[in-house]
Image (cartoon, coloured by chain):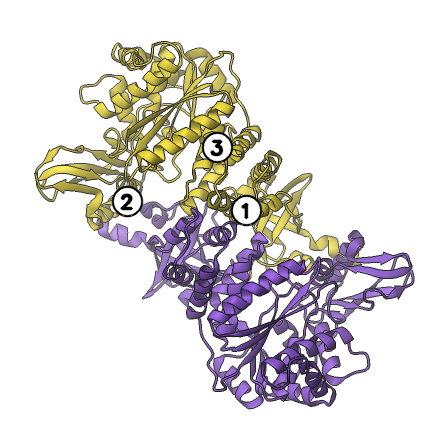
Chain colours: A yellow, B purple
Amino acid sequence: MSMQDAHANGRHLRARRLGLDTHHEAVVLMHKDCPVCRSEGFSALSRVELGVGDRRVVATLHQVTGDWLAGDEAGLSESAWRRLGLTDGETLTVVHADPVGSLAHVRSRVYGNRLSEAALREIIGDIVKGQYTDVHLASFLTASATKPLDHDEVVALTRAMVEVGDRLRWKPAMVVDKHSVGGLPGNRTTPIIVSIVAALGLTMPKTSSRAITSPAGTADAMETLAPVDLDVADIHRVVEREGGCIAWGGAVRLSPADDILIRVERALDIDTEGQMIASVLSKKIAAGSTHVVLDVPVGPTAKVRSAQAAEALSAGLVAVAETFGMHVTINLGDGLQPIGRGIGPALEARDVLAVLQGAPGAPRDLRMRAVALAGSLVELGGLAPDGAGAQVAADVLDDGRAWDKFQRICEAQGGMRVPPVSHHRRPLLADRSGSLALVDNRKIAKLAKLAGAPDDKAAGVALHVRLGDTVAAGEPLCTVHAESPGELAYALDYAAANPGIFGIAPG
Amino acid sequence: MSMQDAHANGRHLRARRLGLDTHHEAVVLMHKDCPVCRSEGFSALSRVELGVGDRRVVATLHQVTGDWLAGDEAGLSESAWRRLGLTDGETLTVVHADPVGSLAHVRSRVYGNRLSEAALREIIGDIVKGQYTDVHLASFLTASATKPLDHDEVVALTRAMVEVGDRLRWKPAMVVDKHSVGGLPGNRTTPIIVSIVAALGLTMPKTSSRAITSPAGTADAMETLAPVDLDVADIHRVVEREGGCIAWGGAVRLSPADDILIRVERALDIDTEGQMIASVLSKKIAAGSTHVVLDVPVGPTAKVRSAQAAEALSAGLVAVAETFGMHVTINLGDGLQPIGRGIGPALEARDVLAVLQGAPGAPRDLRMRAVALAGSLVELGGLAPDGAGAQVAADVLDDGRAWDKFQRICEAQGGMRVPPVSHHRRPLLADRSGSLALVDNRKIAKLAKLAGAPDDKAAGVALHVRLGDTVAAGEPLCTVHAESPGELAYALDYAAANPGIFGIAPG
C-alpha cells in the first residue's frame, strides 16, 4: 500500500447513528486508535470536518477507548447525522476543520472591542451553519454581557439574526403580533388574543415556541387543541383564510440563530437586555409583523423582577424596533403568581377553552390579561381609540365571535382536538389556616415538570387558590397531575421537601 | 409496587464504562426513555448527580435514542468513571444536581462586578470539584477578559488556585525555579538549567507539563531520557539527594484548576494577562519556589508578539509575585524561530544531551539561552554578582559538572534512557536558492504534530538551517520524522500545501 493510499484510507470511516442528543452542536465519536485519529493527529475535543459527497459538517470529536465502537466507525450525534442526511454504514471522510473566520471577531469582542454589522453577520452566519461549539457561544454571549451590546450592536445583531433565516411576507400592510417575555407559568393568552383580533379582521400569523425549561410553551398547549406543526405554506393558507394562526415556530426557520443562542443562555442562566431585544425582535421582524404588543410580567419570581428593569427593557425594545419601522407597545403586568389555573399543556389548554367559551368557572385573570393585550392590538390596529381597545376585545370574546374564530383556525390547522386527561392525581393540602400570601412561580413550574410536563401533555399542576384567598388547614391548594405513579411520587417528594411553593399567612 | 418503590427504582442504573475522553467534564449517557429520565424529568444536557455509596459526581447528561445503550444503563465518560472509582455493572443513583452556588459569583462577574477573594475561592473550589461545565468555564474566562481582572482579583485568583491543590515544602530558605511562557518549538532549556544550578548547590524542584497543543512539553522530552511520573514523595527524595529534578507536574496536584482552565482557554484561543499570571505564579507558589526566572520569547509567531506586550506582562507578573514574597526576574528572548534543531520529544532530548555533553554539533542557541537563564538564577541565588551569572553557568556546563549532575538526576528519577529513533523520514527541500528569512513557529509545530508528536516520541521535525543561513535550491531545510508511513505522508501533504513554513529571500 502506498503512502497516499494509507493516507487516503486513513481518512475514511463507517458512519454509525448513535441517536445522541447534543442539541445543535454536532459531535462525532471515534476510537482513539482509529487510523484517522492517528494520521490526522486528532486529540479529544478536536474540531473535525465530516464529509459525505458534497455535504460537510463541522463536529467536535470525542475519543473512545472502549471496544463498543470499532476502529473504523464514526459514531454521530443526531445533529451531525441529520445535517449530513446519512444512512447507516455510509462512508465518511474526516479531516481537520478549517479555522472558523468569525471567531476572530468574537475574540475581538472578548477583548472589549465593538462589533461591526459585517462582523455580527459573519458570526451569526457561522453559528447557524453549526460552526460554533457551545463553548464558543458561551464566550460570545458572555462578552456581549460583560461589556453590554450598545444600541448599534443590538440593531446589527437583530438584522443579522433576521437575514440568516426565513421571512414571512404578507399582503396586508398591517400585521399584528404579541410576545410575552415569559417566566410566568400558565400565561396562555396567545390563542385567545389571536382569536379576538382575527375575528376583528386584523392579520395575526402567530408562531410560538415549545417549552425549553418551562412546563409548557404556547405550542405545547395549543398542540392539545389542534396541529401546530405548520410549514410556511400551511401558515400562509391558514392566515389567508382565517386572518390568524397559532403555529409552532420550530417548523419554520424564523431567526434560527435565536434558538441556538437561547439554549446556551439558559445553561449560563444569563439573560442580557441586548440579547433579549435581538431575540424577541428578530423573530417578529422575520414573521413580517408591523405592530407588536409586548407582555412583560413583573414580579420577584418572574423573568423581569422590578419595574425599573421593565422600564429599561421596554425603552431598549422600543428604540430598536423603531429602527426597523416596527410599532411596539409594552404592557407591564402583574407577575406575582401564575396566570389561570392550569400549568402544563393540557391543563393550560382547558383554561384557554374556558375563557373562549365564557364558561362559568373560567379563570378571570387569564381573561383579563388576554383582553388587555388584545385591546392594545386593537388600538395599534386603529380599530379603537386609545383606552377603548379592551372593551372592543371583551365584546368579541363575550358574544362568541372569538370562540367561533378559534374553532375555524383549529379546523384550518388540521382539525380540533380534545386535550387529554391525566391518569394519576394527588392534591397538595394546606398545612395551616390563613390567607395565601405567596406562590413561587419557579417552584410551581418545577413541580409541574417533575410531574411530567411538557412531554406528558396531561401532566402538570392545577391551582385551586389565588393570592389573598382564605384557606383552611387540610384544604387542597393545588392538584398534581401525572401519567405515571413514579412521576407523581417524585413530584410529591419535591413538594414535601419544598414547603415554600405556597406561603400562607396567619389570617 | 408502591410509588416509593417505583420512584426509588426509577433512580437506579447499571454503570457502563464507555472510555469516553471528555477531559475534566464528567458526562453520562442515558437512554431517553429510561425510567430515571422520565421520573426525574431530565432533558438533554441536564446536570445530574451520579452517586455510588458515599461518592458523588456531577455530570452532564447526553440522552440517547438508539438501542446500543440499554434503558437501565448509564454510560460514563472516563472522567466520571475515575472520579467515582466504579467497576462495570455497579449500580448508580442519578438525581438532579443541586444548583452550583458559586455560579452566582460568575454571573455577577458576567454582569461586570468585581469578585472578592471569597467568591474566587468558591469558584476555583467548585471548578476543581468538577462542578463546572466547559460552558461555565468559558463564561468565567470570557468575563475575566472582557472586563480584565484587576490586580486584587489576580492576587486573589492566584491564592485560590494555590490553596485548592497540593503544596511542596522545602527545608532550604531559597528554592529557585524557571518558567517559559512558551509558544516557541524546541525551547527545551529546563533540563540543562536544572543540571547547572543543582550542580552549583541551588535547590530546583522543577515540575513541567506535557504538551497540550504543542509537539512536545518538557515532560514529554524528558520522559525519553528518564522517568518523569514522580509523586510528591519521589520529588522530595530526588531533590533532597541531587538538589533538583525534572518531573511531570500532572502526577502532583499543583494548582489543579490551572490544568482545567487552560484547556478551555485553548479552545477559545484566548490568553489573557490576568489568567496567564495566575496560571504561572500559582504553579510556582504551590511548588514552593522563592526565586523564579521567567523566559519570555518575543516574536510575531510566538505567544508574546511584541516588546510592549512583554513589558505589560512582566510588570503584572512582578507586581503579583511581590505580594507573595516571590522574587521574579524576566528574561526577554528572541522568539523569531525555534530553539535548537529538534521539534518533538526525542529530537528535543537529543539537543539537550548534545548541549550537556558539549558535543561538537550542539545547537548554540539552545546552549546560549540555557546559560542566560541559568545565569539569572545564579544571580538571584546570590552565587554571582549581577551580570556575572552567565559565566558561572557556562563554566559548570563546560567542565562537565552539569552533565554529571544530569545523569545523577536521571538515575534518581528511575534510570537514564536512550531516546528512540524514528522509522520513517523524509527531508523538505528548498524550492529556490537564497537566504533563510523566515520560519513560522506555528506551522513548524503543526508539521511536527501531524508527523505524530508528541504521542510518537520519535516523531517530529529536525531543522537543518537557521535564519540568515544561505541555502541552495534542493538543499534539505528540515527532515520530517514519523513512526508510520501514513503520518509521514500526511505531514508531507501539509508541507506541500503550506509553502509558508520557511521563507527564502533571494540573496
Q: Which of marks 3 and 1 is nearer the N terminus?
A: 1
Quadrant of res B409: bottom right
Nearer mark to the viewer, of 2 and 3? 3
Secondary structure of residue under mark 3 = helix
Mark 1 nearby-residue class (10 Å; few <14, some 14–19, many ≥20):
some
Crowding near the residue tagged with mark 3, few <14, some 14–19, many ≥20 C-alpha atoms within 10 Å = many
Q: Considering the image in quadrants, where does the C terminus of chain A appear?
A: top left
Q: A288 or B397, which is in the foreground?
A: B397
For mark 3, name the chain: A
Mark yes or no: residue B392 visible: yes
Q: Do labels 2 and 3 share a chain?
A: yes
Residue visible at 56% across and 84% down in the picture: B203
| Circles 2 and 3: CB atoms closer than 8 Å | no
Q: Mark 1 lies on which chain?
A: A
Residue labelled with disc 3:
A278
Instruction: Give the quadrant of the N terminus of chain A.
Output: bottom right
Same chain? Circles 2 and 1: yes
* Label 1 residue SS: loop
Q: Which callout, 2 or 1, points to the residue nearer the camera?
A: 1
Quadrant of residue A33 within the rendered picture: bottom right
State the residue at coordinates (51%, 12%).
A171
Residue designated by label 2: A487
